[in-house]
Amino acid sequence: MAQLDKTGHYKKIRNPRKRAFLAAVAHTGNVTKAADIADIARSAHYQWLEADPVYAAAYEDAMEQAAQRLEAEARRRAVEGVEEPVFYQGKQCGVIRRYSDALLMFLLKGAMPDKYKERTSTELTGAGGKPLTVTFISPSEGEGEDGGA
């Protein structure tokens, strides 16, 4: 990871436009939105990526920060939940905390993929439920260069 200074800027990036873009992309995780925030053309970012390896490393770090922000938010919604208002006769009468089982499952699959991966099994049968017969033909046995296909 690229090192940040005390203000959260990348130490080796001196160009203020690059620094503004990197801070924005670390926050949003979106190149188009970060370019708008930093008031640069998206093409400038891609030119910097090709021409400046220090910038490219800082960009990878910024995108990792954005991904970690997303993961933290997913974890918060799955574990802590979010409060949703409850209405009765058009007026709010309380709140209910909702948790996301789907986000929790994604987090579990990411954290322990061997334990929580999707498991599928496929069984093939021939016509009428009879055993499937497969015959392999080598290209030299087939007709022409394409093996008879």
Image (spheres, helix red, strand yellow):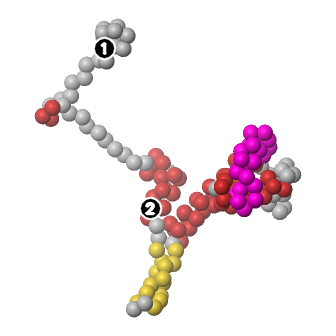
Residue depth check, mark 2 versus mark 1: number of the one nearer the observer: 1
Q: Indicate the position of residue 132 as horizontal and vertical percent values.
A: 21, 28
Q: Kindly tell me whether residue 65 is visible in this rendering.
A: no
Helix, strand, or loop for circle 2?
helix
Nearest the eye: 80 or 10: 10
Identify the residue position indicated by label 2 in the image.
Answer: 102
Label 2 Cα crowd, 10 Å radius (few <14 / some 14-19 / many 20+) = few
Is 132 on the left-hand or right-hand side of 108?
Answer: left
The C terminus is located in which quarter?
A: top left
* Residue, disc 1: 148
Secondary structure that dominates the magenta span: helix
Residue occupying image coordinates x 37% and y 10%: 145
* One can see residue 114 in this view: yes
Which residue is at a point 76% across and 59% down the rendered structure image?
39
Closest to the observer, 89 or 7? 89
Residue 141 falls inside the magenta stretch: no
Question: Viewed as shown, does residue 23 lie left or right of 74?
Answer: right
Amino acid type at circle 1 is Gly
Question: Mark 2 belongs to which amino acid?
Answer: Ala
Q: Residue at x 77, y 44 (%)?
A: 48
**Magenta stretch in the rendered image:** 34-56
